Amino acid sequence: MAVWFAPREIVHPVEGDEFPVSGWAFLRWSLLSLVFVLAGFLCFYMIGKTGLPRSRLILVGLLLIGGGLIGVAVNIGRTFRHRRLILGDECVQFVEGNELVLGQIPYDNIADLKFLNHRTRKGVAIVCVQPLRPDTFWSGAGSVFDDSMEYQCDVIIGYGLTLPPRRVFDQLLARWRGFGELEETAR
């Protein structure tokens, strides 16, 4: 079960170790979008030079150019949003800008952490004790894979950060275990 909803009350970023999302991933997608724009212009160039219908080339060209320009705009916008993962004393958060918390999982709501090291997916799989707890949410975070169900977890983090996923896992695991030890001594 994935955790994909917004919090019921306003949540503020916590103090802790911050790991920014790398802008290079979004810039690479922007470059791919530019390839679509160029392919669209190539369709216009081919009008009258091939046996293909003019209307079809115009339609395909407009769709490629429009889709490519939207892709460029979206990805360049994402590059400058100042998104980051924060490992606080009591929770892990995914934050955008100065105040917008996109995701939060308290350490006492983490049942298990797994490191994913597949061909196409590297990251930290988080299994929550109670995914629907009001203080646990992960809505639209950019470093989350959409295939958490495939890996039998609630959230996967670590993709696109400036820190390699293995180091994110090691640091999150240390924080989670440290929190559990603090909780035990407080009882």
Image (spheres, rainbow, N blue to C red):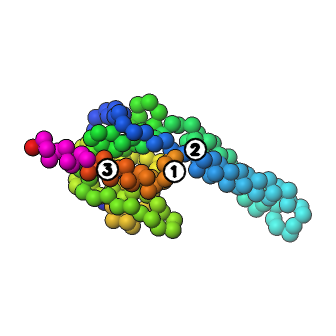
Q: CA distance from mark 3 to mark 2?
A: 27 Å
Residue 71 place in picture, x, y as percent: 62, 48
* Relative height, residue 164 to residue 52 (above, below): above
Q: Which residue type carries mark 3? A: Ala
Which residue is under mark 3?
174
The overriding secondary structure of the stretch rendered in magenta is helix
Which residue is under mark 2?
23
Q: Which residue type carries mark 2? A: Gly
Q: Residue at x 30, y 43 (%)?
A: 91
- Element type at marker 3? helix
Q: Which mark is residue 143?
A: none
- Element type at marker 1? loop
Which callout, 3 or 2, points to the residue nearer the camera?
3
Q: Residue at x 49, y 53 (%)?
A: 164
- Which comes before the other along the chain, label 3 or label 2? 2
- Which comes before the other along the chain, label 1 or label 3? 1
Q: Quadrant of residue 80?
A: top right
Residue 118 place in picture, x, y as percent: 47, 67
Q: Quadrant of residue 89?
A: top left
Q: Is residue 8 left or right of residue 25?
A: left
Q: Is residue 2 left or right of residue 158?
A: left
Question: Residue placed farthest to the left in the image?
Answer: 187
Q: Nearer the viewer, residue 19 or 127?
A: 19
CB atoms of marks 1 and 2 within 8 Å: no
- Element type at marker 2? helix
Residue 184 place in picture, x, y as percent: 14, 47
Which residue is under mark 1?
160
